[in-house]
Image (cartoon, helix red, strand yellow):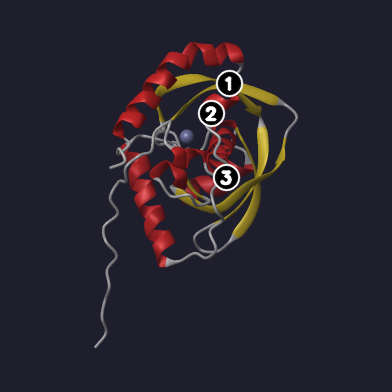
Amino acid sequence: MVEIITPPQPAPLRLRIWGDLVLRKKAKPVAAITAEIRQLAAEMVETMYTHHGVGLAAPQIGRSLRLIIIDTRIGRDLLPPDPSPGDILLAPRMPLPLVNPEVIRASKALETCSEGCLSVTKVYADVTRPAAVVLRATTLEGETFEVECDGLLGRCVQHEIDHLDGILFPDRLSREELRKVETELAGLEKTVKRRRPRPT
Ligand code: ZN
């Protein structure tokens, strides 16, 4: 008799918030694309959509692994008006889980844009980053690709890969921008510390 194992329905996971130490760890590479990794990716997609994000990295749900999800499609139009090669290649596959993603080249040209993060609740600030990057990553089907990304996709990819290195967007703010959000960040940190179990 063949036993049919149905994977559990993906359910959203608890988000880790600014001040949680798992967000500061350097995440480990994914060694193999297993059923467990696929299930985790499905749960991360659910979590990202529940919180209306355009990207999510595994440390944000407490797993220190180099796995991210991206969905930068806006509304019903799949592509932005001036799509990069990355938009053309990746948008049709979104929501897209990416394994061991890395930025292998970055443009000298910089761009400043408002950013937020599901782990830095309700804080938004202007972050300066390279305007375009070349992303190398592997899909859950085991296909490794390299593609140039700019605009929202390029920014999202850089933001999510930062998470894998323990970097959060407030770390990249100018002193002036950081000053504007300092009080909110301290508030988030206090909430997380209060939630941490006390040693018995
Ligand atoms: Zn984030």
Circles 1 and 2: CB atoms closer than 8 Å: yes
Q: Residues within 10 Å of mark 1 (few under 14, many from 20)?
A: some
Label 2 within 8 A of ligand 1 by Cβ: yes
Q: Position of residue 195 (x, y in %)?
A: 30, 33
Foreground of the two, 33 or 171: 171
Q: Residue tagged by mark 1?
A: 173
Count of all numbered marks drawn on residues in the image: 3
Residue 88 image label: 3
Q: Secondary structure at mark 3?
A: helix
**Label 2 SS:** helix
Q: In the orientation shown, which residue stands out farthest toward the front?
A: 200
Residue identified by numbered label 2 = 169
Going from N to C along the chain, the mark reached first, 3 or 1, is 3
Q: Residue at x 56, y 40 (%)?
A: 157
Q: Crowdedness of circle 3 by 10 Å Cα count: few (<14), some, many (20+)?
A: some
Residue at 30% x, 37% y is: 198
Q: Where's the C terminus, which quadrant?
A: top left
- Asked whether residue 104 is in view, the answer is yes
Residue 161, horizontal then vertical, whole percent: 57, 42
Residue type for callout 3:
Ile
- What is the CA distance from the residue labelled 3 to the residue labelled 1? 30 Å
Cα separation, mark 1 vs mark 2, equals 7 Å
The kind of residue tagged 1 is: Leu
Quarter in which the N terminus is drawn: bottom left
**Is residue 29 depicted above or below 59 in this figure?**
below
Q: Mark 2 touching mark 3, by CB under 8 A? A: no
